Image: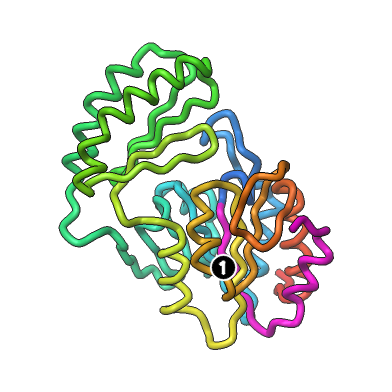
Amino acid sequence: MTLPVAEIFQELAGASHLFLLLDYDGTLVPIAPTPDQARPTDRLLKILESLAAAKSVQIAVISGRTMDELKALLPILGIFRVACHGAFILTPAGINHSLLPDGWSASSLNEILRKVEPAVSGKEGFLLEHKGVSLAIHYRNADPQEARRFLDHVALWTLEGVSKGTLSILRGHMVLEIKAPGIDKGKAALFLLSRFSPAGALPIYIGDDETDEDAFRALRGRGITVRVCSGPQPSSATFRLADPAQVIELLERIEERYGTTL
């Protein structure tokens, strides 16, 4: 259901406590040609700082980014950072949690990396990100036909690991990610809510990608879920916003109601 920002705000304005669960790329900031170019604005940082300082608001940024990237991009006190699609959680108190499966080894992932790296070398428009527990293959700037052929090869290379349960595949906006199994944003969101959410807090999850659908499904009936998308794509989210600009508008309204003046 697509609603104006004001109407979505009315859905949450009566809550005494909010737990904001926010994706980063495509949600807080627009999708950029390369990950390095997707930077937060000063206004966004100020809004998040104000909300993080409020007693009635908790914030978690749940992203496919690494923890080091989240720390650098969002140098804000008082927020939860969830990296690598839910594999790692850093609390505001500096305590680390890992949601990786017990005994998981990166050997299968490293074997795929040894095949992907030379195969993509010299191909224009591809970008590889090795995050330790996942390998992201960005192809936004690649020739579409070449990207399809290359991803077909990757699917064959990962078939054994996927069938054995040592790897899983995640598809996002012009990116394919090969990662540790059993990790998703929905599990991370439920972990945060079960461990750190005050009784009666209203969860609000906002995300833009297929990677966020796990969280939308996990929170069905428990809170407000918002898919950021310009078109009528299928989604388990309750509401929709068109773009990150509308997300910022919603956060501004939340800040006016719940935030702390800095």
Q: Secondary structure at mark 1?
A: strand
Q: Quadrant of the N terminus?
A: bottom right
Q: Please tell me which residue lies in front, 251 or 49.
A: 251
The colouring scheme, among rainbow, by chain, secondary structure or one colour, is rainbow
- Residue found 46% across the figure and 20% down from its top: 147
The boundaries of the magenta stretch are 1-23
- Residue found 52% across the figure and 63% down from its top: 217
Residue 211: % across, % down? 49, 49
Q: Residue 19, relative to residue 100: is it above or below?
A: below
Give the labeled residue for mark 1.
Answer: 59
Q: Does residue 189 appear to the left or right of 153 in the view shown?
A: right
Whether residue 57 can be seen here: no
Q: Please tell me which residue lies in front, 95 or 6.
A: 6
- Residue found 31% across the figure and 62% down from its top: 99
Q: Residues within 10 Å of mark 1 (few under 14, many from 20)?
A: many
Q: Does residue 201 appear to the left or right of 192 in the view shown?
A: right
